[in-house]
């Protein structure tokens, strides 16, 4: 079960599938079942590109980041904790910062590339 659960979380982090299905599958996993998976800049960049390409809606990005942000079994790329935590916080709560637009996604994409 742990291998399957880890793959479900990897699919969520990499946004491999419909966001609603990925979130529902991840929520069926008991936290602490296995070693955490890692959110890295590449996964965040890929998510932003999905929105910019019209493959996902801004609300999908909010749902994705909200789910990642609240899970204790998803770690952040070492050395990028501050940047990726801020990314998750801002994207998961656009009502506190600014609406998710193409411009915001482009700015964040630039920021994530600049820290490579």
Image: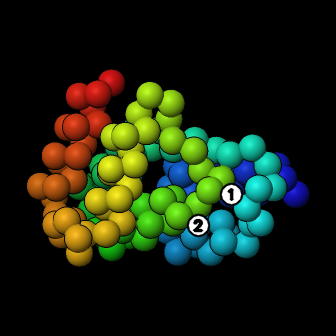
The residue at 23%/70% (across/down) is 96
Q: For mark 1, give the secondary structure.
A: helix
Mark-to-mark CA distance, 2 and 1:
7 Å
Q: Residue at x 20, y 37 (%)?
A: 110
Crowd rating for badge 2 (residues with CA inside 10 Å; few <14, some 14–19, many 20+): many
Q: Quadrant of residue 43?
A: top left
Query: Left or right of 15: which side holds 101?
Result: left
Relative to 39, is 95 above or below?
below
User: Disc 2 on helix, strand or loop?
Assistant: helix
Residue 43 visible? The answer is yes
Mark 2 lies on residue = 22
Q: Position of residue 2 (x, y in %)?
A: 84, 53
Give residue 63's quadrant in the image: bottom left
Q: Quadrant of the N terminus?
A: bottom right
Between 22 and 99, the one nearer to me in the picture: 99
Kindly identify the residue that appears in the image at 68 percent across and 46 percent down: 36
Q: Is residue 7 left or right of residue 12?
A: right
Quadrant of the frame with the C terminus: top left
- Left or right for 61, reference 77: left
Query: Which residue lies most toward the right here?
Result: 1
The outermost residue toward the left is 103
Q: Which residue is mark 1?
A: 8
């Amino acid at each position: 079960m742990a291998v399957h659960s880890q793959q479900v979380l990897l699919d969520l982090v990499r946004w491999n599938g419909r966001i609603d299905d990925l979130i529902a599958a991840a929520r069926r996993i008991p936290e602490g079942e296995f070693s955490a998976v890692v959110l890295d800049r590449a996964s965040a960049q890929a998510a932003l590109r999905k929105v910019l390409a019209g493959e996902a809606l801004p609300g999908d990005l909010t749902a994705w980041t909200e789910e990642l942000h609240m899970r204790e079994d998803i770690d952040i790329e070492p050395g990028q904790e501050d940047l990726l935590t801020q990314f998750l916080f801002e994207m998961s709560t656009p009502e506190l910062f600014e609406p998710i637009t193409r411009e915001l996604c482009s700015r964040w994409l630039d920021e994530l590339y600049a820290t490579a």
